[in-house]
Amino acid sequence: MTGPPVRAAGLFLAILFMAQVQSIRPWYAHWDKLAHFFCFFAAWWVFRKGLPAGKGVSFMLAALLGAVIEIYQMSHPQFQPSWFDFLADLVGAGLAWATSMVVSTMNGFDIRRPFRGLVPSAFRQRFSTKPLPAILISGTLVVVSLATLRAHGPAFGASDAPLPGSAAQGPAAPLVDNPFGVAPSNASSKRLSLWMGPMAASGVGWIRGFSPTLNAAQLPQGGARAVQFSGILEYRDPANPEAWQQYVRERVQAFKGITSHWEIWNEPPNFTPNTPPEVYGRMVALAHDAAKGVDPSVKVGLSAQSVNLNYLDRALLSGAKDKFDFVTVHPYETADLIPRGFEAQYMSIVPTIRKMLQARNPERAQVPVYFTEIGQPVDAKNDERAQASQLLKIYTMGLAQGAARVHWFEPLDGDSGPFGLIGPNGRKRPAYLALESLIVHLGQRPRYRGWLLLNGLHHAFLFEGPQGLVVVAWAGPGSDRNITLPAGASVIDPLAGGVRTASSLTLTEVPTMVVFPTTETAWTTQATANRARPFPWNGDHSRAKSIDLKAPGGWTGERGLHLVQPPVLREVGGEMALDASPRAITAFTVDPNFLSYTSQPVRITAVVRRNSASAAGFKLKYESRSGMKSVGWNTLPSHNEWSTLSWSIDDPQFVGKFGFHFSFDSDTTQHSNYSIRSVSVNKE
């Protein structure tokens, strides 16, 4: 059997396989690769050899095995393909299944009989002597039926059953202003039943983002109903403002019983044709008026990629003023620097937003600020324990700096990688247990009291919780990690859940919680006093006129100016210096207490030297009122002596969009073969 239709079917399946290779998701790739190997083998055989009867059984087994693996992968929740991937898998499985039926029939097996109930009698009679169409129809209908079960209810036994903890018990809890949230990916938002119950059981109060097909009937009953939703008004073409406002009205009306909180776009200018902030400001105003026209109580919010406050600043000057009820940011990059000791940079996000609002829209200066996406995947650099540690720091410092909500991305591994609190096979990761423990001991309405530097080194944050005063603390960069605890203290391991009484504690990089009586005064008095003070970063630089980092004769550290990447030192001319050659870009962060948002003229000075006779140089790039700016190309003049380069900048606006404020950018490592003795920033 080698006719054109059979060859075309084989070629189509081969093309489908190649397309699927491009869309394989890493956390289920091992299943897809195996399945598509067998399907591709079957397709190749059909295309090259036809269907010789003598090889039929081998072909049938290969295709059937591929189809079985496809169906297994589609039926298990830990493998989260998008709808495009799912439909491609469906077609691949259907073709493999159907062609295997063809071969079975050619080898004398009558396999149409079990599927006759799926095929109308008229079709059976017409094609009774033509097995190929009949079996293609039968097989396709079987797979479509399975796909329908997959999409709308439990399929293949209990594969789509809710995870343990999903069935909420008892009456709905009263809604509170709960700051603990999660943010599902597009794929996970369509699998609500797999994770909403465990999230509600942990104490999570908000879900940011949901499927457009969500309706009230799909929401879990009982305690899970205490979880509230916030939505996203997605990008629409600014060239058609009437259509934009109609879309907003329809969304607000359609989900009136589900949410009253809407972000305007997701991470602009991401997911847009690089829409300028001036256009975004006008779209915000239109959305605000349209939404309030449907429901005056609805809340709409500004949104930006990462911590792109330069973008929001210009949007507020272009129509967004007085047209928002909250502000959202996604500080992934800033949070990524926390393990390097950049707590102060992360702690400055909300205060810097307040500065911006006070300058551009003082009537809205105190609106809520939400971190509606933030997270860390489990990968080669970060194991599950590191993810849990990062979660504890992100929520603790988010609440401490004044974020009204923090949403972890995401509750369940989805289509962006293994970010989930719930991992493969429905297993709760340590990060889930850490969040659950944090909520239990801080309560669903945490009351922040202030911060401490234990032994002058270790970050600690004091809250008033349901069981008493709670300190969340972790080790700083110093070697002294033993601390003395207040009398009557209990130590809680948020990853393991153990509780023990103790008089002292050895801190590690993973945060620990300490609960102690409200009668304790030493820590409480100090934390309360610190709350109004600048959060320190190797000292208080709030009144400094200049900051620097230096390396003459050996690395002397950072005084208000911080290197984003771990330093690499080398000997140059008999002294130790910072080696810039391993990377194309050397980035710097200014202590936010020294300068943030305010456009204060500064002079940046660098003492540099080529490492060899080869040419080296860089562009100075910095955050400005109009976004990232670049200052020329600076060729380093000599490798025999140090050279001083200096730049006066009159329009800086340091907000830490991606966690840094300025950089020396050599384009490639071919031009970064130089060393740095010192860098300083002086206010002019």
Image (cartoon, rainbow, N blue to C red):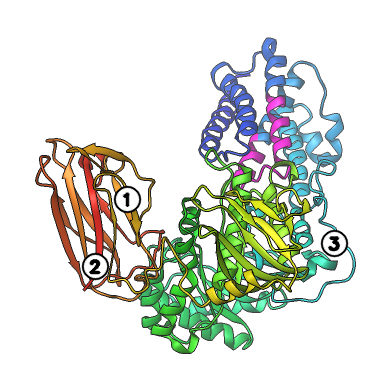
Dot placed on the residue nearer the N-terminal end, 1 or 3: 3
- Please give the residue where the numbered disc 2 appears in the rendered image: 682
| The disc label shown at residue 634, or none | none
Closer mark to the observer between disc 2 and disc 3: 2
- Please give the residue where the numbered disc 3 appears in the rendered image: 168
Closer mark to the observer between disc 1 and disc 3: 1
Q: Find residue 291 and report its horizontal and vertical position in percent.
A: 57, 82
Q: What stretch is highlighted in magenta?
A: 63-92
Q: What residue type is labelled 1?
A: Thr
- Please give the residue where the numbered disc 1 appears in the rendered image: 556
Nearer to the camera, 37 or 550: 550
Dot placed on the residue nearer the N-terminal end, 2 or 3: 3
Q: What element carries label 3?
A: loop
Relative to 152, does residue 649 appear above or below in the rendering? below
Q: Find residue 190 and report its horizontal and vertical position in percent.
A: 68, 56
Residue 159 located left or right of residue 10: right
Q: Is mark 1 on a helix, strand or loop?
A: loop
In the rendered image, the residue lying farthest to the right is 170
Dot placed on the residue nearer the N-terminal end, 1 or 2: 1
Q: Find residue 107 and report its horizontal and vertical position in percent.
A: 76, 15
**Quadrant hosting residue 86:** top right
Q: Does the magenta stretch include residue 88?
A: yes
User: Can residue 183 be seen at all in this image of the molecule?
Assistant: no
